[in-house]
Image (spheres, coloured by chain):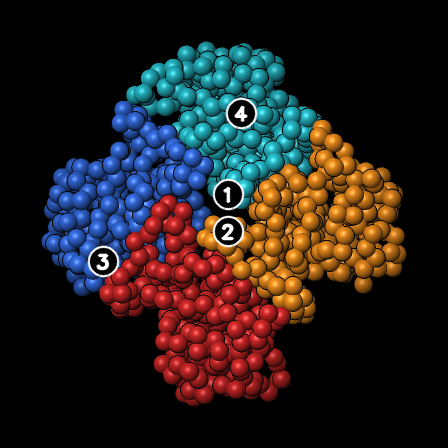
Chain colours: A cyan, B orange, C red, D blue
Amino acid sequence: MKTQLLQDLALANRILFNEGVLDGFGHISVRDPSNSQRFYISRMMAPALVTVDDLLEVDLEGVVHDSAGRRTYVERFIHSEIYKARPEVQSVVHSHSPTVIPFGVTGTRLRPVCHMSGFLGGKTPVYEIRDFIGERSSLLVTNQKLGKALADTLGEENVALMRGHGSVAVGTSIKQSVYRAFYTEVNARLQAQSLALGEPIYLTEGECEETTEAMEVHLDRPWQLWVRRAKAAALDDHGA
Amino acid sequence: MKTQLLQDLALANRILFNEGVLDGFGHISVRDPSNSQRFYISRMMAPALVTVDDLLEVDLEGVVHDSAGRRTYVERFIHSEIYKARPEVQSVVHSHSPTVIPFGVTGTRLRPVCHMSGFLGGKTPVYEIRDFIGERSSLLVTNQKLGKALADTLGEENVALMRGHGSVAVGTSIKQSVYRAFYTEVNARLQAQSLALGEPIYLTEGECEETTEAMEVHLDRPWQLWVRRAKAAALDDHGA
Amino acid sequence: MKTQLLQDLALANRILFNEGVLDGFGHISVRDPSNSQRFYISRMMAPALVTVDDLLEVDLEGVVHDSAGRRTYVERFIHSEIYKARPEVQSVVHSHSPTVIPFGVTGTRLRPVCHMSGFLGGKTPVYEIRDFIGERSSLLVTNQKLGKALADTLGEENVALMRGHGSVAVGTSIKQSVYRAFYTEVNARLQAQSLALGEPIYLTEGECEETTEAMEVHLDRPWQLWVRRAKAAALDDHGA
Amino acid sequence: MKTQLLQDLALANRILFNEGVLDGFGHISVRDPSNSQRFYISRMMAPALVTVDDLLEVDLEGVVHDSAGRRTYVERFIHSEIYKARPEVQSVVHSHSPTVIPFGVTGTRLRPVCHMSGFLGGKTPVYEIRDFIGERSSLLVTNQKLGKALADTLGEENVALMRGHGSVAVGTSIKQSVYRAFYTEVNARLQAQSLALGEPIYLTEGECEETTEAMEVHLDRPWQLWVRRAKAAALDDHGA
């Protein structure tokens, strides 16, 4: 079962690149189902090239447990602090997906305009790193304090934007966090285009709840497609 | 002949994905030419992966007739109710095509700006599901009542938008419904870009009629292209 | 030499599709270098699939000369009338390239914002078919009268837009008409994006002349690329 | 070591095309590490097709040193004059990347909205060739005087826009100039989309410095991806 999980995690890295959510940067992790104090994430590399052999085990203090001494991303604290704060979360995606960033740097709030993205709810928060470290930083979440501040900003939501940087999406499974990261980007495109045409009708709170529940049972449908596409677009000779 | 029809339906699924009309969701159906009370549609799966073996027969009450007991989409009532209301319609596409959704959530009406999309006519209607089920729904067309309301909204038009959800396009053949779904999305892009530049000159009613008739005889031209492209981009080992 | 010309014409069809200028519709022709009263164009089919065997000879009255009795596009009069009016023109592209259409349906004039598209000059004209056939037409250029009206609108320019329909680009060679059709679309994207940011600085008349002359000698550079890409993306088993 | 450098330069040409920074035009060069008065650049051809065999050695007066007498780009003075003015610069990219051009023709200044593009700093300059050669030019940098004017405009910045033409990005290595050219285009897209939503929060001067330093150590991550993608998309039979 852990083999399947790690294969899914490697695939998810490639899917997120292949579907335009990640570029050369960004990462996805999954919590260890047999040890809630550990999670898996790739070593520091471009997600499109990740295979099972590149996955490392990290604890909730951000320490890598790898006999080969390999390093993971400096922003691993995004993951560790969210796992600490949210026991039900099993997977976290951090991306720079392109249409989400503009919502993070302007006052325009990201809100769901279609049933695919009801999980955004009514108040997608924006993490302003300046509030925690001042106006002279790398914008990167490089330690526990900044990771905790991000987890606090996220609160009980499924997605948080990071000003001038990107966003995080969480889920109770790899399939769900991938679905959410993907449809956060889709919604950003739909909302931006809607705003250019007029004042959009957003989903009501009730519609957010009902659509989230309704789509939840269909996560396998796009996943099967994305897997097939990622395999067809494979950039290497390794199976995942 | 039914073999050809089912092959075309499987191909149409893959074409609609390949040309950017469908993503992991959405569906296309065709009425059974030998039994107007039945239609064919894929089992519940991503359209890009559909082959002939995945096609099911469904009646106009939405009941699947499949010896293997397979299930189709919960939104099959979109199809069954339109077939009930519109005897001349032989094929229905339901999509979330991305540039059409913004027209469904703003007051800006989708109107034809070029000769390829004259079939849109002058008054593309928008289906507001809140009018029929209130402000707390999944937005999905999950029963006959909601399907009938959508068919009523569509009326005698070729395309209807669904607020916060997507759209439907109908035709007298698979090729025509696919053409219409594709050029509805194209027109949405053209119209959105036109609106950013100034006030567009829309097709007159007469131009809508004449262009629809003129293009009708050329449906095979893009179809041949789309078939070739779908086959070249096939994600599986099955022929359709 | 004619063999090379016809191979280039077949390739140009596929290039124009592959580079996003044509979709399932549109066409390119080349004048017969040994008989200025004739031109070559594909039979009625999607340009992406055209091979040398699909090319037909047509005279300037729009009559096809083909022993097999094959038909070409109903809009062949776009080509025949431009060849009549402009003796120096050797190749004509008619496209529905997507970002050009919005300029044809709004009052915003297409004007060059970069050195690649200086050939647009200062006054890209727009052909309004209503002026010649009224408000109830198919918008198609289906006879000599409409073709002549389009040629008149084009005048001595290199590109003319057609309201609600597309555009034409002409050149003294296949490479030049393809280059112009491609960079007309590129310029439309650049200009639309510029207009969203502020008032663009357009090329002066002198810059239009100088850039056109300067780029003229470099047509082979993108052509070699486009040929390679079209061959890599070939949708059929035929060489061109 | 020079072999590796030239392989990287050939690959960089193909990467910049494959990632949408260059089209049929544009060029990248690298300074000769063993002779600071010389640089390498392709012969005059489409960058997507460049292999090691196409690379030429040019001196800082713009003279090509090639026993076969091959020619390079007429705009080689962009490179030679920047290398003269900026001893620390080891690589220069000149592109027409599409979303950057609109910032060069309007008063809207290109400014960093995300941590990937902090290298843009606070005052990306715009080169107006009319200031140096008047209102009747080809816009091309065809001699030393125009190259020097561009280098003067660039000053100590990493990127300069060229009105109606494109931009230049410089770096202390091929990987850095490629990274900067790519994320200049990315930032232009992000900034344009942000401006459509509201007033963006730009990076502070301190954030520009810190993000530039922080990303500097991660140049290999996207580079490995881009190499893999360029090789997978190779349009020829030559290795680089």
| Chain identity of mark 2 | B
Left or right: C197 with respect to D69? Answer: right
State whether residue D100 appears in this view: yes
Asked where in the image residue C182 lies, by quadrant, the reply is: bottom left
Could you say where residue A7 lies in the image, as x and y percent from the top left? 57, 29
Q: CA distance from mark 3 to mark 1?
A: 36 Å
Q: CA distance from mark 3 to mark 2?
A: 34 Å
* Nearer to me, B135 or A155: B135
Kind of residue at disc 3 = Leu
- State the residue position of label 4: A124
Crowdedness of circle 4 by 10 Å Cα count: few (<14), some, many (20+)? many
- Of discs 3 and 1, which sits in the foreground? 1
* Nearer to me, D84 or C150: C150
| Chain identity of mark 1 | A
Tell me whether the residue at label 4 lies in contact with that at label 3, contact meaning CB atoms closer than 8 angstroms.
no
Q: CA distance from mark 4 to mark 3?
A: 47 Å
Asked where in the image residue B140 lies, by quadrant, the reply is: top right
Which secondary structure lies at badge 2?
helix
Kind of residue at disc 2 = Leu
Q: CA distance from mark 1 to mark 4?
A: 20 Å
Tell me whether the residue at label 1 lies in contact with that at label 2, contact meaning CB atoms closer than 8 angstroms.
yes
- Of discs 1 and 4, which sits in the foreground? 1
Kind of residue at disc 1 = Ala
* Nearer to me, D158 or A239: D158
Residue at 79 percent of width and 50 percent of height:
B82
Tell me whether the residue at label 1 lies in contact with that at label 4, contact meaning CB atoms closer than 8 angstroms.
no
Residue at 33 percent of width and 52 percent of height:
C200
Kind of residue at disc 4 = Thr
Which secondary structure lies at badge 4?
loop
Marks 4/3 same chain: no
Q: Which mark is residue D140?
A: 3
Q: CA distance from mark 1 to mark 2?
A: 9 Å
